[in-house]
Amino acid sequence: MGIVVKFLLIALVVALVIGMVMRMFRKPAPQTTGPKQQRMPLVVPLIGWLLLIAGLGFGLAGFSARPGTDPVPMRIGSVVALVLGLLVLLMHRNRYVQPDADRVRFRTFLGREGTITYRDITTFAVSENGWRSRLQLRAADGTRLRVNPAVFDMSPTLAAIRFKERTGRWPSPGEAR
């Protein structure tokens, strides 16, 4: 009986890994309506799915343990892996950044949407910390956005910041940068 369960678990994991790898190399369908929303890299949902699968495997192993063994640590590990996997998948689904010519639209990990128009930006900072860069924006109403410009294409926003540094004012809507 135990060998059959192990074989089924291995077959399930192999099938899911093959499916995720195929999904990673598939090109997403381009959006036909509206500007492009940039999401987190595809490695993020891959990690989420792996945590979810590991949690299911731990749970199955924890609830089918031999008599005389302590299954509680495996059960706790399964719950932790399941919750972390679901959180990572939720983060990937919710988070997006959409820089336009006149504003940046975004949604946070928890699903709160925000918009920062370039004229409303009170403070901005582009910083380098070793291998990681960071763009921080703060609007007059207190809305904040922190993104990594190496992950998300923030070229319209960076062009507006260069315009502000060059001329001392933010570009008007439709103005050439």
Image (spheres, rainbow, N blue to C red):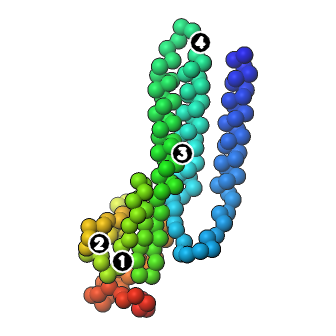
State the separation of the CA atoms marked 3 and 2: 32 Å
Q: Is residue 62 above or below residue 40?
A: above
Q: Are marks 3 and 1 in contact (CB under 8 Å)?
A: no
Q: What's under tag 1, amino acid-wise? A: Thr
4 or 2: tag closer to the N-terminus: 4
Q: Nearer the viewer, mark 4 or mark 2?
A: 2
Residue picked out by circle 3: 48
Under circle 3, the secondary element is helix
Under circle 1, the secondary element is strand
Q: Quadrant of the C terminus?
A: bottom left
3 or 1: tag closer to the N-terminus: 3
Q: Are marks 1 and 2 in contact (CB under 8 Å)?
A: yes
Residue picked out by circle 1: 117
State the separation of the CA atoms marked 4 and 1: 61 Å
Q: Residue at x 31, y 65 (%)?
A: 144
State the separation of the CA atoms marked 4 and 2: 59 Å
Q: Which mark is residue 66?
A: 4
Q: What's under tag 4, amino acid-wise? A: Arg
**Picture coordinates of residue 137 (x, y %)?**
32, 70
